[in-house]
Amino acid sequence: MSSSAVTRVSVEISGTEISFETGKMAKQASGAVVVRAGDTMVLATATAGNERDVDFLPLTVDVEERMYAAGKIPGSFFKREGRSGEKGTLTARMIDRPLRPLFPKGWRRETQLVSIPLSIDHVHPYDILAMNGASAALMISDIPFPTPVGAVRIGKIDGNFVVNPSEPDLLDNTDLDLIVAGTEDAILMVEAGANEIPEAEILDALDIAHDAIKLLCGAQRELAAKVGKPKMVFEAPKFDESLLVAVKASHGAALDEATQVFDKADRENACKAVEAAIIKEHAGDPEADGYSERRADAKTAFEKLEKSTIRQRIAVQKKRPDGRATDEIRPIDIDVSVMPRTHGSALFTRGQTQALSVVAMGTLREEMRLDTLGLETAKFYWHHYNFPPFSVGEAGFMRGPKRRDIGHGALAERALVPMIPSTEDFPYTIRVVSDILESNGSSSMASVCGSSLSLMDAGVPLKRPVAGIAMGLIKEGDDYVVLTDIAGVEDHLGDMDFKVAGTSEGITALQMDIKITGVTFDILRDALAQALTARTFILGKMNEAIAEPRAELSPYAPRISTISIDPEKIGLLIGKGGETIRSLCEEFESQIDVNDEGQVLIYSQNGEMGDALVDRIRTMTKEVAVGDAFKGKVVKTTAFGAFVELAKGTDGLLHISNIAPGERPSTVEEVLNKGDDIDVVVVEVDRERGRIGLRLASDPSVAGKSVEELAAAATAEKERSGGGGGSREGGRPRRDGGDRGRSRDR
């Protein structure tokens, strides 16, 4: 295609050019834009399909990661991409959340937004480009999308805020990873992970982000002005307001009473009964013509009346459905160590929301390996979230995690990551699973609290406990109220879902979705301040249940021990062809790693096995000294004595004159035979000649003597014998051969 058909606009954000190009790729889509920063390129498309007879917005957002973009071949058996990974799923959610509220009310055509990363330079993350590209594709399409949405990332590096930091900085060098999306007038979505950032700094970062968002929205408007298609003519379905007046007159009082029932299930049943009565009265005869339309209108009238009733009561009367004050938290109940055989567990209940969080720990070999477009290759801590249908009293399919489950799990993981110790300080792989057993709002924040508790119960040395709370907003005209610890109905009918997680020192995770455009920074400031008060209260409740991480791990948790040995002893530990280290692994049901510096990592299924293996390796590799006691095995008998194995590869000689104190047998075999276990004490070590002399531990000349006394006796004996020592044929340390280096025998 000729270059004249290609249209390109660009904007500079924090010194980096971000360009939007259309007219070259995917020209049959309703709108298609290639967004580029550096050598990272993303194709974003928007397509509208057929009209659907549904009562919701049929919007689908897909992010299709292609491994070729980073010059990789997929690691699966089939060598092709399968279902979206976690990064693609989370990016799709971040595209969806700010765009969905802006579609015109009543839009019922199937709409699909697809983003495909085409090139990855590992400097400019593709997620921000995909978010901007999806909005730009909508803006140039014929879909009646009203206004552009821009997205930026804010990092905090060396104490300074940075707009769109590089991917290496995000991985290793930032205390804040804040993604913000919004229009030229307002912020619509926030997603953040932070290392205990104060609330005031979060507000400053949001202000900086919004300035950059305005520039990105301007570039999209410029592109739409040049090549945008005429928008489809669309009229929202008209609603008969007189029907709403009639429904309010006939059932307004009943609905007002039903929406104030305290229990969630009872309230839903009461509201359904009112809905059924409204449909019966106002839809008419089910057999008459036009019944389905009248029924739909009556249902819509009920929904409008329910929403306005609850919102007016909260915003104007400051009265919530369950009777709480605006800043009141539902009753909290906490149990830890609820399951005896798990490594750590906690049951966190807040009102009618309940999360069971369980910790499982493994060795560093059990890390999660990542085959993605990013730089990160492994994770040693991760969090999974499950939302079974029974948690809300429903029956449904359970076919693996949904997008929402992945998103909530990632949020809880992000909240706890800054508090997880490094693998150098705590060499374990950690998996936390939160199963939501009941849900009536804010289950993701309940899983944050439950997971923090279960990690402490498991003995994971968290820097500080983490708690989470969900804030809401109801805004009616100039009246508004910020709600603490929102329940399900307040989330569904409200204007904001603002989840805040953190410690006593600051915020560790944020997730905010706005459904209206009139949220000011004053409202956000109020919400953050109210969330801090709530978080402090919840941390106090958690402290009452468990004040600090347990000092001891569960007896069922694997043990990881570290000891250092002389690098010269590595060959001795490994043995010929790895024979010694393999036999130790089998005997103690453990795994052993050793590096060239002599650091030995021992992975055992339990503490008893681990301690025994540590003692064995320490005994094997220590330098034998006068006074050391051993339980040895006779490995050879000769005319002059018995050779006793003190450790793998090291023998000592028990001279025939010392085999039976007080008498000298004519042969060794009269007293000892090969394979006998005996207790001996080292009385001589001649390193020049490689000799180790032994006495029986029961020998009166040895029993009760100090190391110093034994050493003095050995020196005197050596002098009496002319320097040859009391055991001329003393044992020689022997060293098994074998390759030095790292071993992974199991």
Image: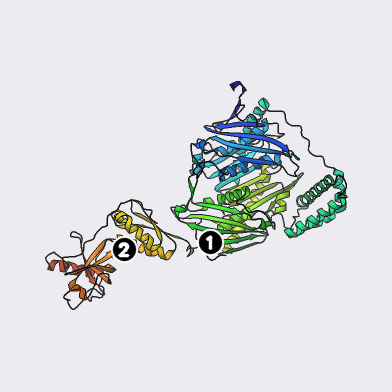
Q: Which mark is residue 344?
A: 1
Picture coordinates of residue 740, whole percent (x, y): 31, 51
CA neighbours of label 2 inside 10 A, class few (<14), some (14 to 19), many (20+): some
Q: Within the image, what quadrant is residue 261 found in?
A: bottom right
Q: Residue furthest front?
A: 78
Q: Nearer the viewer, residue 116 or 711?
A: 116
Query: Does the image show residue 188?
Result: no
| Quarter of the image with the N terminus in it | top right
**Of 390 and 250, the residue lying toward us:** 390
Which residue was labeled with disc 2?
Answer: 619
Q: Is residue 678 above or below residue 494?
A: below
Q: Is residue 533 above or below residue 703?
A: above
Q: Does 48 sit left or right of 671 as displayed?
A: right
Percent across and percent down for residue 357 are 58, 58
Residues 50 and 221: in front is 50
Asked whether residue 717 is in view, the answer is yes
Q: From what the image shows, is residue 390 above or below residue 225?
A: below
